[in-house]
Image (cartoon, rainbow, N blue to C red):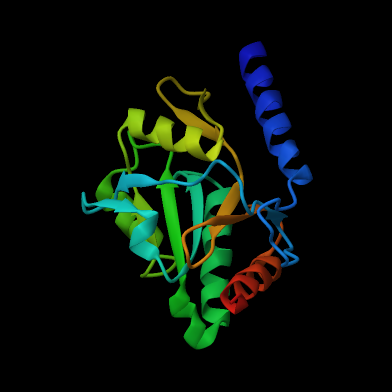
Amino acid sequence: MKKRTFLLALSALALAGCDKFNGPGGSNTAFKGIDLTGAEYARTLSLPDAEGHMRTLADFKGKVVVVFFGYTQCPDVCPTTLAELAEVKRSLGPDGDKLQGVFVTIDPARDTPELLRTYVSSFDKSFVALRGSDEQTKAAAKEFKVYYAKVAGKDEGTYTMDHTAASFIFDPQGRVRIFTRYGSGAQALADDVKALLAEK
């Protein structure tokens, strides 16, 4: 328990540091989320999708990409985040095709390819699910500074997952730009997506 508490505190401190990051890369856009323009992390993502094909951020160039780390048995944060993202996509009308949702599972042991396909498509048919090995998942989480950990359940053999509850938003050029905390709401996300689409 002490170790878990320490890790949670460490993660919170790392993410709190994002508040002081206001785009030294030269962003002139005011975002509702935390400006990560010029950040030296969350720059690469390379994992297999539910079909077994390797996917990278370059696959979605030309679109605003929202990356979220979670798991299918998540009771509230994950489904709420994906539902809000689907809502934003619909609200954009024709520009909805320029928004790509990417769900990265932190629980590859239980999140089978079949389950992931069904899960993400229940929110939006265009959403992509990525599922790596334990090692690949750890590497991706490290690149994004995402925290996750298995937490034993009340019954033997059961568990849940603690994880960073936030999304990373990339501009159409594939650069990470915004960190959006869970609970910010669909409207704030929509405003930030529109701001990125409007940039020249």
Q: Quadrant of residue 123?
A: bottom left
Q: Tell me which residue sits at (75%, 51%) in the image.
A: 22
- Judged from this view, the residue extending furthest toward the left is 52
**Number of numbered markers:** 0
For residue 118, above or below residue 94: above
Q: Is residue 80 left or right of residue 22?
A: left
Q: Position of residue 82 (x, y in %)?
A: 52, 60
Location of the N terminus by quadrant is top right
Q: Quadrant of residue 29?
A: bottom right
- Judged from this view, the residue extending furthest toward the right is 20
Q: Nearer the viewer, residue 143 or 38?
A: 38
Is residue 175 visible to the viewer in this orientation of the structure? yes
Q: Is residue 75 left or right of residue 131?
A: right
Q: Tell me which residue sits at (61%, 50%) in the image.
A: 38
Q: Is residue 82 left or right of residue 59?
A: right
- Judged from this view, the residue extending furthest toward the bottom is 94
Q: Position of residue 160 (x, y in %)?
A: 50, 32
Is residue 76 visible to the viewer in this orientation of the structure? no
Q: Tell me which residue sits at (53%, 23%) in the image.
A: 154
- Judged from this view, the residue extending furthest toward the top is 2
Q: Nearer the viewer, residue 92 or 183?
A: 92
Q: Position of residue 153 (x, y in %)?
A: 51, 25
Q: Position of residue 148 (x, y in %)?
A: 53, 32
Location of the C terminus by quadrant is bottom right
Q: Tell me which residue sits at (56%, 81%) in the image.
A: 92
